[in-house]
Every structure is written in structure tokens, then in C-alpha cells.
Amino acid sequence: MHYWNPSNLAILACPGAEAFADQVTFHLKNHYRRIFDKAASDMSRRYNLSVEETTRKINFIDEVTRPGGYCHAEDLKLHVPKFKTPARFSMFANGEFKCEIMNSVRGKDLFIFQDVENHCPVKINDGSETRVFSVNDHLMALYVTIDAAVQSSAEQITVVIPVYPYSRQHKRKGREGLTASRVGHILEMLGVKRIITLDIHSRELTNSFNKIKFENLHASYQIIKALFNLMPSPGDLDDFVILSPDTGAVDRNKFYATALKKPLALLYKERDYSHISKNADENNISVMKLLGSVRDKKVFMADDMLGTGGTLIKAMKFLKKEEAGKVIAAVSLPLFSGDAIKYFDEAYQNGLFYRIIGTNAVTHDELLKREWYVNVNVSKLFAQIISRLHQKLSLSLLLDNREIIIKSLSAKEQAIYSGKQGDLFTAPSPAKKTD
């Protein structure tokens, strides 16, 4: 039995990252309750005490060793750690940011959350002002928050940033910078020890750091779960093909093809990099070719991010000309920049696709109202990673989730052929496997 005392674990959310940080905190508290309940039950049997008396003693020890680290409650109930650390963010008239951490983080294992692609209005200056931040605004807010944490003597700082900023500027084709790498170097210089992100655009980025530890999570388990929920009947699995939308996404879609035991096709695209993609109509794709067959097939294609959406919509138009059937796309990072939502509304009305699966790693308001959009929650995955990092436990099962997916798919396949339906992805969950 392993009892985890997480009172020196702290979460701090930058402006725009509050929603995601709150969801991760919710799962962390549930995770802690499960560990606590198991520990109290085991110890009560071992020492011949009632569960209530064991709970009271554990609460007593926790509050003596870590005063102020827990929310006060009845002695016979679990005292849940606070986890979330409040902070005050100010923005001056000239655009400068200031962060003031309201509680002590001295000696804490601090996880700082930031959603650089949140373009919904955020409150600053004690809620008296509301602004829409750019990526650069969010990034600067992150920098000053990290500096405030360093000056406040946090023991270790981890940045939780689901969308890694400037990740598309990862290779040089001419007189241009490698900004993706430089962002990491700045974080490293500020004192960050680890970065947690989701489906980084280029895995080679992990090789550009000197000392920083880089945890690249994958949403494949949650996406496959959503995909199966979209296809409840046995016949929906027939005539199914996985399509890589470009050569850069081959490995990702090969993973899905192998897991689902379906054929893999490829869209080959040539781009004119002298033009910048401004929206779904004005993109830089000059040539598109199909390797494989999609005629009368259900098509599933996955990519890491969706920006203006021009590439994906052009691919959907191409698939319609090739007489493909139902088209489902999945993106780990649904940015939907500019007028992308409007263009996808039009594409949906024209029958170009059936559904788009995205994650809550990016905060949206309007997107969640769309019939064609399926939102999957990855906050539990981040909570599991944070818990295991804090406990100094292995992350292997969560970083490479093929084993979990294969077992879930086998159970789902058996249920389909036996005529039984249900959400087989909920038990056993990865959390229960790794507690």
C-alpha cells in the first residue's frame, strides 16, 4: 500500500487557463480520495481500528506535518488538499503584465497552467477589466508568472501548456528562426524543470532542450472512445479506412490503423510556402493526390492541430470528389483560428463531413455549441500525469497507451458481436491501473 501526501503539490493558473486547471484539480482531488480511502481501509484492518478512527488519525498527522495545506472539514471525513493557489494578475496601460501569488509556494512542487490559444475574454485587474489575449499576451503572462514563482522560492516548477507555442516554427527553410526551440530555452532559463504538453507538432522539439524534461501526452485513448460512441451499431465498423491527411501525420494515423485493424490511406499534398494560409479558402496547398481507396468507405483522419482549417476542408472536398462516405476527423488541439468555425459550418451544411472530434485542451465557447463538434476531456489524463510525477512514479503506461487501447478495443469488439452495448472504456480506467 502506498499512501500519498500531496500537500506540497500546488497548481497555479495563468489568465485563460483557469477552466482547464479547475478540471484537472477536480480529478486530482478525486484521485486523492481514492488513494486515501484505500489507505484508510487497509490501515484499519492492519491495526484493528475503525475506518473513522483511522481517518481521524491520518487527518491529524497530515495537518500537523503540513499545517494550512488542507481544507478543514469534520475530523471523521477526508481533509482534501487545497491544490489550487490563488494569484492576482494585473495588466498596465502600456501592456505590461504583473503576477502576484497570494499564498506561499515556498518548497512547493508547483504546476503552472497556461492555455496560449484561449481567445475567449479573460478577466484581469481583480475582474475590473476583460480582454481577449493573443498568443504573445498569454506567453508573456506565463513568463511573469514563472518569475514570480521563482522569486517566491517554489522548489520545482512544471509548466502545463497543452498547446506548445510557436510549435509550427520548428524547422528552417530559409532565413527564418527556430522559434519553437527558443521558447523552450527561455522557459529553461527562467527556471522551469519540466514541460507537459499535448501532441507536440514536431517530436524533434524534445531534442532541443539542455536540461528541461519534456512530457508529450497523447489523446488517442480519449479520441478512440469518442469515435466508438459515434458508431454504436456493429455495421458502423464495416468499410472503414484510416486516412493520413498528409505525410507528417502518417505515424499518428498508422497508430489508429493498427489499433483499429483497418487499412491506411494517404493524402499527398504539396504546398507553396511563398503564401501564408489566411483562412479556409486561402491556403497554400498547390497539389493533392490520394494513395489508397476511399470510395464508399467511412473515413477517419487524425491530426495534431487545426488552425484556420483550410487544409482539412480542402481534403474533405477532395474526399467527396472521390466518393467517400461518412468522414470523421480528430484533432488533439482544436485551435479554430480566425473564421474557421464559420467555414466548417458551411462545410457541414454542404455534407463534407459528419463530425470533428477535439479535446478541451483549448478553451472555446462557440465551438461547443456546434452539432458537428464532439468535445473529449483530457483533464483526467493530465491529473494522472501530475499525480505520478509528484509521487515520482513511472509514466510509461500513460505516455504509451497502446496496451490500454488494445484491451479496451478487444472488449468493445466482443460486446458488438455479442449484441451488448455500453461504454466499455470506463473500466478499468488508466487511473485505477496506476494508483
Image (tube, rainbow, N blue to C red):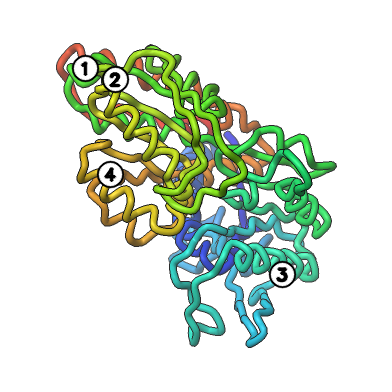
Q: What label sits on residue 416 in the rendered view?
A: 1
Instruction: Report which residue position mark 2 lands on.
Output: 412
Callout 3 amino acid? Val
Give the Cα separation between the discs numbered 4 and 2: 32 Å
In the foreground, 55 or 10: 10
Q: Residue at x 56, y 64 (%)?
A: 84
Q: Is residue 1 visible?
A: yes
Q: Earlier in the sequence, mark 3 or mark 4?
A: 3
Instruction: Report which residue position mark 4 lands on.
Output: 347
Give the Cα separation between the discs numbered 2 and 3: 47 Å
Instruction: Report which residue position mark 3 lands on.
Output: 144
Q: Is residue 426 visible?
A: no
Callout 4 amino acid? Ala
Callout 1 amino acid? Ile
Which one is closest to the eye, mark 1 or mark 3? 3
Give the Cα separation between the discs numbered 3 and 4: 41 Å
Which one is closest to the eye, mark 1 or mark 4? 4
Q: Is residue 7 left or right of residue 188?
A: left
